[in-house]
Image (spheres, rainbow, N blue to C red):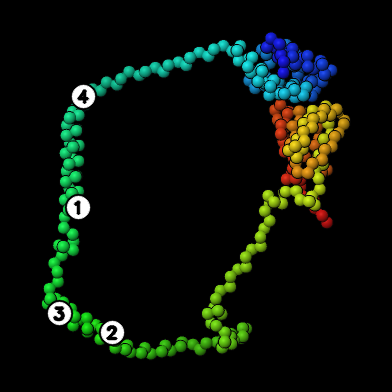
Amino acid sequence: MQASDNSLGPYLRSEREQQGIDLHDIASSTKIQPKFIEALEADDYDQLPKGPFVIGFLRSYAECLSLDADEVVAFFQAHHSRQKPMPSPPAQPRQRPALKLPFSIPRVSWQRGVIFSAGLAISLGVLFLVLRSGPSEQQLAPAPSADTVADVRPAARQVISASASPAPALPSPVPLAPSIPDLSSPEPSPATDPIAAEAPQTDAAPPDTPDPALSERPTLDSPPLVLRVQALEETWMRLDIDDGNRQEALIKAGQSREWTASSQFSLTIGNVKGARVSLNDQELYLPSTRSNVLRDYVLSRALLNPRRTD
């Protein structure tokens, strides 16, 4: 982009005139009022709305002329920043006066604090050494005498002999009621393992459900994606087909165009309200924006509704 004397407006006007596009055609395509377009071409930014509206006007104007919108905006910001006044330094916060207390707080001497800390550390160190070097519990406990060992051995023999004698048999429990055989189920055969018969049945593993992300991927049998754009008003658009092929078009009112892709489209359109978009004969409703310009909107099979088959 070459703009002489830091003048962006005359450069845009010359590009428009070289392409043979009328000012009202730009206003109809970008939905910008003609007086704002005249102010852009005259570098009269005081007549334009403040804030991000100027950036949006420049982007829509540049895209309608097939210019690099980012480069136009960067040139405007670099030129416009030199015209802004220097910001005033922030005001220094007022310092509050020190609070005066009606009484005085006694100050503790730092020498006393050091002496107290040192004495506490020495006391803790001495206590740790005493506990660490003290006799163990095994040394403090007295060894058992021979008489105690002799008294324990006969008692142990009596306990062993008592445990070796057989315990009396318990009487068998009397059944409260006779058991009623189950006539609905056959009796198990003697060879049947009772443990296997009582084992609970485990539920069968659920069938594997297909991954929804994998179902959206195009397969060899998937039909191609057919994008159809019908212009209700004059519309400029740009397409990135399958992340490789980029195409631009300016569709007049009443005309329509079609494109084909295998996986997806990336759509940038300069007049959202003036276009009707359909994918595989299914009409899509594009999100509306304040500038009526939609950028890099991905159109894939995920937007298609599954058709019912009777």
Q: Which residue is mark 1?
A: 132
Calculate the distance from the C-alpha at mark 1 to the C-alpha at mark 2. Answer: 46 Å
Q: Which residue is mark 3?
A: 150
Q: Of the two numbered discs 1 and 4 on the same chain, state the one appearing first in sequence.
A: 4
Q: Residue furthest right?
A: 254
* Alpha carbon separation for disc pair 3 and 4: 78 Å
Q: Secondary structure at mark 2?
A: helix
Residue 228 is tagged as none
Residue denoted by label 4:
104
Whether residues under marks 1 and 2 lie with C-beta atoms below 8 angstroms apart, the answer is: no
Q: Which residue is mark 2?
A: 163
Tell me how many marks there are.
4
- Of all residues, the one furthest to the top in this rendering is 5
Marks 1 & 3, CB-CB < 8 Å contact: no
Mark 3, secondary structure of its residue? helix
Question: Of the residues shown, which amino acid type is indicated by label 4?
Answer: Ser
Instruction: Name the mark nearer the viewer: 3 or 4.
Output: 3
Please tell me which residue lies in front, 163 or 128. 128
Please name the residue shown 75% across and 16% down the image: 12
Three-letter code, disc 2: Ser
Residue type at numbered disc 1: Arg
Dot 2 crowding, Cα within 10 Å, few <14, some 14–19, many 20+: few
Front: mark 3 or 2: 3
Query: CA gap, disc 4 to disc 2?
Result: 83 Å
| Left or right placement of residue 116 versus residue 24 in this view | left
- Earlier-in-chain disc, 3 versus 2: 3
Say which residue appears at 66% left-offset and 17% top-offset. Answer: 76
Q: Quadrant of residue 200?
A: bottom right
Above or below, 64 relative to 146: above
